Amino acid sequence: MTIAQAGLFRCAGYVALLLTLLGCGGDNFRDVRNLASTYEAIVCFGDSLTEGVGANGGEDYPSVLARELAYPIVNAGRRGDTTGDALARISDVVGHNPRLVIVLLGGNDFLRQVPRGETKKNLAEVVRRFQAHGAMVALAGIRLGIFRDEFAPIYEAIAKEFGAYYIPQVMEGILSNPQLKSDPIHPNGAGYRLMAQRMAGKIRPLLRAADRSTGRRGF
């Protein structure tokens, strides 16, 4: 390879990298369904991990995420919900006309030994119904399983099939750290703050991409 050819090769590599970064900011947002949603609200939908069990008022992850994004967020978490229970509450949430719904479910399915096939079916229906109303969906994954992560393939498959934005392992390292948890299955305020910061790092660029697709000013 000549010096000139090497230079061209390097330039081509830089251009490809730049286009990749400009096009998706490290994530492929083009595949997110309803990216150009015209609604406004952001809703966090889930179980006790969304409600904020184990933390004081205002320390739940949706409240912290709202402060991180400087944008109001609706906390639609309810302790004890399985994916099946959550399906019954979707009509209440779509009443907010959400632009984005962050779904965090599955922990109670695991604890109650709900068949994984049923969990996948319910979770897919949750995503489908929100999208049918015009919302983007961000699907947050958590590690569930004693010896291996039994639910990651479910989250990943649903996100890919339905065009949801997948956020993996939002609780990584939290429940194994006594300083970040309030009991064996719930974070404390510091744990929820870490969850929210991880979420913000993913949600902020998603909303920026959505704003670019609609031409509106925002994130």
Image (cartoon, rainbow, N blue to C red):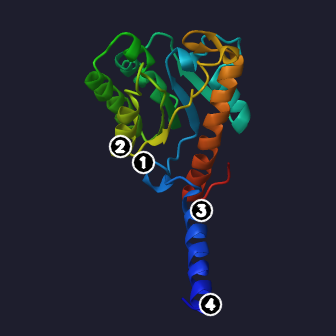
Q: Amino acid at mark 4?
A: Ile
Q: Label 1: few (<14), some or many (≥20) within 10 Å?
A: some
Q: Are marks 2 and 3 in contact (CB under 8 Å)?
A: no
- Distance, label 2 to label 4, CA atoms, is 47 Å
Q: Residue at x 51, y 14 (%)?
A: 78
Considering only order in the chain, which callout, 4 or 2, is on the residue closer to the N terminus? 4
Instruction: Give the residue pinned by disc 4.
Output: 3
Looking at the rendered structure, the secondary structure element under dot 4 is: helix
- Distance, label 1 to label 3, CA atoms, is 20 Å
Residue 162 is labelled as 2
Q: Nearer the viewer, mark 2 or mark 3?
A: 3
Instruction: Give the residue pinned by disc 3.
Output: 21
- Distance, label 3 to label 4, CA atoms, is 27 Å
Residue placed most toward the observer, 190 or 208 = 190
Is residue 56 in sight in this rendering? Answer: yes
Instruction: Give the residue pinned by disc 1.
Output: 33
Considering only order in the chain, which callout, 1 or 2, is on the residue closer to the N terminus? 1
Looking at the rendered structure, the secondary structure element under dot 2 is: helix
Q: Nearer the viewer, mark 3 or mark 4?
A: 4
